[in-house]
């Protein structure tokens, strides 16, 4: 259940920062999915969430 909450929060953050993240190369990774449903765009950043998760874990280990 905890991972689901983390994934939903990460999706909200990535959706809000989508334009800026694409400038630095994130958001276009092979596992990131963009769906268009009923005129709306839904962004599911599976691969970018994994990258940020690993980076957060490394920062947590160093601190």
Image (cartoon, rainbow, N blue to C red):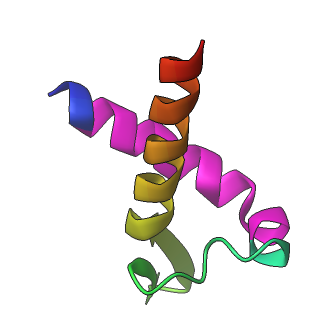
User: Image point 54% across, 43% down: which residue?
Assistant: 55
In this view, the residue in front, 41 or 51, is: 51
Q: Position of residue 14 (x, y in %)?
A: 61, 55
Q: Residue furthest left?
A: 1
- Picture layout, residue 59 above or below residue 10: above
Q: Position of residue 20 (x, y in %)?
A: 84, 64
Magenta-colored stretch includes residue 34: no
In this view, the residue in front, 43 or 22, is: 22
User: Image point 22% across, 25% down: which residue?
Assistant: 2
User: Image point 51% across, 33% down: which residue?
Assistant: 58
In this view, the residue in front, 3 or 37, is: 3
The span picked out in magenta is: 4-21
- Picture layout, residue 41 above or below residue 21: below
Majority SS type along the magenta span: helix
Quadrant containing the C terminus in the rendered view: top right
Quadrant containing the N terminus in the rendered view: top left
């Amino acid at each position: 259940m905890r991972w689901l909450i983390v994934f939903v929060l990460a999706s909200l953050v990535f959706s809000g920062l989508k334009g800026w993240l694409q400038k630095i190369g994130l958001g276009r990774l092979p596992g990131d999915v963009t769906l268009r449903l009923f005129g709306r765009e839904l962004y599911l950043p599976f691969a970018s969430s994994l990258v940020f998760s690993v980076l957060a874990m490394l920062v947590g280990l160093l601190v």
